[in-house]
Image (spheres, rainbow, N blue to C red):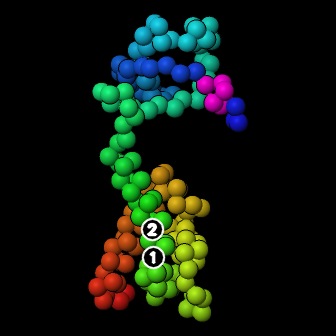
């Protein structure tokens, strides 16, 4: 898998239609003849490809979906909160960091990953349950700062 970038073929395409069969989703793309890599013409039907797609805006710049933008903000928020002394104290107060340990960013990151069941904060990209659990934790932290004790 290390040579993916070297082996990749690039072309611009327009989504024409989608349908569903018992085997999966069929995605039809229209590719301008000048954009179509010659290897696509000669590869056998049934050839497998790894596909990466980026939606483009009218200025040919990558578009990020609202959902992905929200997820990116959550990941950034998780990083910022773990650096926050008050958040570290909150995590200790709710038992995610042991009382006999000096709270730190590292301890907060470890506790956050453990609590959310993820290996790294970037796992929030693909784990909707962890995203929701983090939102709840962030809301509880906001209440905690206002004096509410769980």
Please indicate, yes or no, whether residue 129 appears anywhere in the rendered image: no
- Magenta region includes residue 128: no
On screen, residue 15 above or below 88: above
Q: Give x and y (percent) for residue 50.
A: 58, 29
Q: Residue at x 55, y 71 (%)?
A: 109
Q: Relative to 15, is 98 above or below?
A: below
Marks 2,1: beta carbons within 8 A = yes
* Residue 5 forms part of the magenta stretch: yes
- Taking depth in this image into account, of 59 and 24 the one nearest to the observer is 59
Local SS, label 2: helix
Q: Main secondary structure of the magenta part?
A: helix
> In this view of the protein, can residue 101 be seen by the observer?
yes
Q: Position of residue 66 (x, y in %)?
A: 32, 46
Asked if residue 66 is positioned above or below residue 14 in the image, the reply reads: below
State the residue position of label 2: 80
Q: Range of the magenta residues?
A: 4-8
Q: Which mark is residue 92?
A: none
Can you tell which quarter of the image residue 143 is in? bottom left
Towards the viewer: 15 or 62: 62
**Residue at position x 70%, y 36% in the image:** 2
Residue 84 marker = 1
Q: Is residue 44 above or below residue 128?
A: above
Observer-nearest of 25 and 130: 130
**Side of 66 where 48 appears, left or right:** right
Position of residue 1 in the picture relative to residue 126 (left or right):
right
The residue positioned 60% from the left and 88% from the top of the image is: 101
Image quarter hosting the N terminus: top right
Residue 80: x and y, percent?
45, 68
């Amino acid at each position: 898998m290390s040579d993916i970038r070297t082996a990749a073929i690039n072309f611009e395409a327009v989504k024409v239609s989608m349908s569903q069969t018992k085997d999966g989703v069929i995605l039809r793309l229209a590719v301008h003849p000048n954009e179509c890599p010659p290897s696509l013409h000669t590869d056998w039907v049934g050839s497998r490809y790894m596909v990466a797609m980026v939606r483009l805006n009218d200025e040919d710049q990558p578009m990020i979906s609202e959902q992905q933008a929200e997820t990116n903000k959550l990941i950034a928020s998780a990083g910022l909160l773990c650096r926050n002394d008050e958040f570290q104290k909150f995590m200790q107060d709710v038992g995610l960091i042991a009382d006999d340990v000096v709270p730190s960013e590292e301890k907060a990151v470890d506790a956050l990953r453990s609590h959310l069941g993820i290996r790294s904060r970037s796992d929030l990209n693909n784990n909707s349950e962890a995203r929701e659990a983090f939102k709840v934790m962030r809301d509880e932290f906001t209440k905690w700062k206002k004096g509410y004790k769980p």
